Image (spheres, coloured by chain):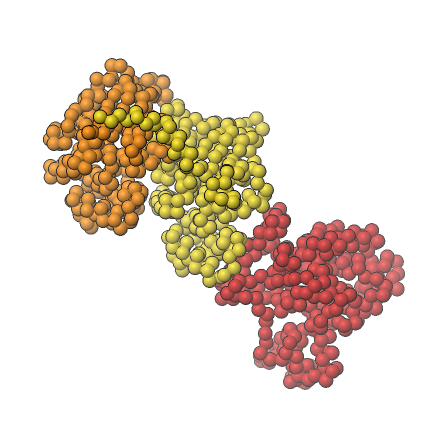
Amino acid sequence: MMVARIDVRSLSKSFTLHTQGGVRIPVFAGLDLRVHAGECVCLHGPSGAGKSTLLRSLYANYKPDSGEILVMHDGAAIDLASAEPWRVVEVRRRTVGYVSQFLRVIPRVPTRDIVAEPARIWGLPGEEADARAGDLLSRLNIPRRLWSLAPATFSGGEQQRVNIARSFVVDYPVLLLDEPTASLDAANRQIVIALIREAKARGTAVVGIFHDAEVREAVADRLFEVAQFQRAA
Amino acid sequence: MTTVSATRPERMTRASAAVRKPLLKVEGLNKSFGRTVACRNIDFTLYPGEVIGIVGESGSGKSTLLNCLSGRLAPDAGSIAYDLRRGSEDAPLVDILTLSEPERRMLMRTDWGFVHQNPRDGLRMAVSAGGNIGERPMAIGARHYGDIRREAEDWLARVEIDIDRIDDKPRVFSGGMQQRLQIARNLVTRPRLVFMDEPTGGLDVSVQARLLDLLRGLVRDLGIAAVVVTHDLAVVRLLADRLMVMWRGDVVEAGLTDQVLDDPHHPYTQLLVSSVLQA
Amino acid sequence: MTGDYNFAYLDEQTKRMIRRTLLKALAIPGYQVPFGGREMPLAYGWGTGGIQVTASVIGPRDVLKVIDQGADDTTNAVSIRRFFERVADVATTEKTTDATIIQTRHRVPEANLVEGQILVYQVPQPEPLRRLEPRETETRKMHAYGEYGLMQVKLYEDIAQFGHIATTYDYPVIVNGRYLTAPSPIPKFDNPKMQDNPAIQLFGAGREKRIYAIPPYTTVKSLDFDDHPFTVQRWDGACALCGATDSYLDEVVLDDRGKRMFVCSDTDYCGQRRAAGHVGEQPDMDDALEPEAR
């Protein structure tokens, strides 16, 4: 029997741009989405349909206008749309991982530490976290000589792979992926596909935006049209 | 299939919140200077190990709020309840405004810290680096020179100051070193709460990055809660779990740092976020 | 004879005010009590605080001794002694044991004091924290709340810089387990004498207008560290004149070729010992001097 890891109910989101005369931009309204363990849902639709907005809302990075985002955390459902900040931090620490399109570089911190950090925060001992970080960096073809450097000077593709490693270092029950393969070559794309498939096999619920058809077909179980909720907004 | 609605999320949240005890709980804090309202009805709760950023422009009331919270300024109204752990771990919070002055001063040099924007305000410039770090331990009774010295050396290393500089006066230090020394001087007693007023203000950008990274590591490793006042959004992005945006004495927006910065709702926050130049 | 002055120079109202201050000071050992210091016929720094205290406690039957750096025959001591001879018409002495009141600058006599004697210290700076914390409002709070960590920082700095506590005079003490107190610029050699002393110890600071006191038999503890305990100065040799090994010695330079000798700083103590037959290596100082230096 499948368990819904994410249960989005009647979610609405709009932006009001006060700096531009208070114009209101509706994105979606009345949106429902369920994602089960081991399932990968691909957010689909044209540019501007609200895919990234939905994904960011699932991470509580954006604040929805109304509705619920229930996430299974420690065996109970937490509504990320209304949870207290410290609880959101807890959910992010242990349950929901997020791969953004760009790596936010922290000055001075070496690559390996950046990747190991979520594992440490999750609660792994330092050495084990470092070992896992090393495994992932190797797998994603980041040469060992770069591990001790801060990734500020890395190429776009390298930064993206560091970013991916950082989110796969913990076996999050829920993974949110925003174009994880956008700037990767074919070989590295295959590695990311394998990582996502392994996560699914472990029972991870995955929600992603995959523009690349090859990746989409390789990992997605179904497409979710965000645009269908646009008219209601 | 199992429905998630079997457990009501609200109830869950409340049940766990009861277990989690706040470190600092501010309610209805008001402070005016004449007819100017510097802080209007400020409420917020800080949990152990949590870092909260307070951002806003000059005159928004953020520094006044920090001074009220840290006991350096008496608010006109409101309460500032702190977990003194009097008697036991689960003793109720105590309004620090009801403490006697010596109790408050003791709190400020043991369980609290204050990092000033200008290191000269937070350091004794005529006392060596080691003496600056040793002052707090000595103030609470340390009387073994060797132990005090070893602790000072340990802290110099933690804030990345060469141990050879232990007997140098801070006046011969660079601005970044002075600021790191100020941090060591504050953290040596393992405070549970540290107030920071523009901790990276007045430093070169390259020095800022190093200091921020150091602060971030220390705060995390030691599980210190902090209230950081700054006008620099990059500082709170890196340091703060949560953010409060102040504007003309009001907290106009509050929430998770990335939420407030990436999806600002209040007109002032939107202006603040959109005004940052992208490097 | 007293001439045109009131007995002991100060008017009776002022003396009463100072006596009240002294009583308060004795009631709170080591606590600095402000008082309305008067203009005295000599400049600040020459003992105006000590003179006002002496003038307030002296009576016609008292016997006064005045020392400066242990000596009775130095300018400051001679002037103050003459002052009280003139304005109070009291007997004076150079013998510590004969005196009922001893006004001192920078020394505690070597001879043990007894009950009934009063030791009056001249104090230039009564606030031991002043050089570390310039704000009076703040030092008052530090005293009020017993926050004396900063004084320990000063001693820490000494050890860090010199390897030992290099403060040798005006060495800070805690009086009666409570107040941090400046013993005035006496050598730290004299600090242990303050502890449990049978005499009354009064301190007057004229410029700063503060009076404080240590009642008889009061605990006076010199600050230190567990691993750098308080110690007093020791000399390898003895007093060249009287052979004493237990007194505070002054170095006397005899010529420009490095010749020197050590003699007791307390001239009365040295004289008493010599009168009792004690002899040092060079009992006659004049003999030690080269002919051209005589």
Q: Position of residue B269 (x, y in %)?
A: 39, 27
Within the image, what quadrant is residue A48 found in?
Answer: top left
Q: Taking B9 as reference, is C294 left or right? A: right
Q: Residue at x 60, y 54 (%)?
A: C129
For residue B43, above or below residue C180 = above
Chain displayed in red: C
Q: Position of residue C76 (x, y in %)?
A: 73, 66
Within the image, what quadrant is residue B49 found in?
Answer: top left
Q: Taking B187 as reference, is C97 left or right? A: right
For residue A144, above or below residue B71 = below
Q: Colour of chain B?
A: yellow
Q: Quadrant of the N terminus of chain C?
A: bottom right
Q: Taking B166 as reference, is A233 left or right? A: left
Q: Residue at x 68, y 61 (%)?
A: C218
Chain displayed in orange: A
Q: Quadrant of the C terminus of chain C?
A: bottom right
For residue B82, above or below residue A42 = below
Q: Residue at x 38, y 57 (%)?
A: B162
Q: Residue at x 46, y 60 (%)?
A: B147
Q: Position of residue C104 (x, y in %)?
A: 72, 65
Residue B197 at least partly seen = no
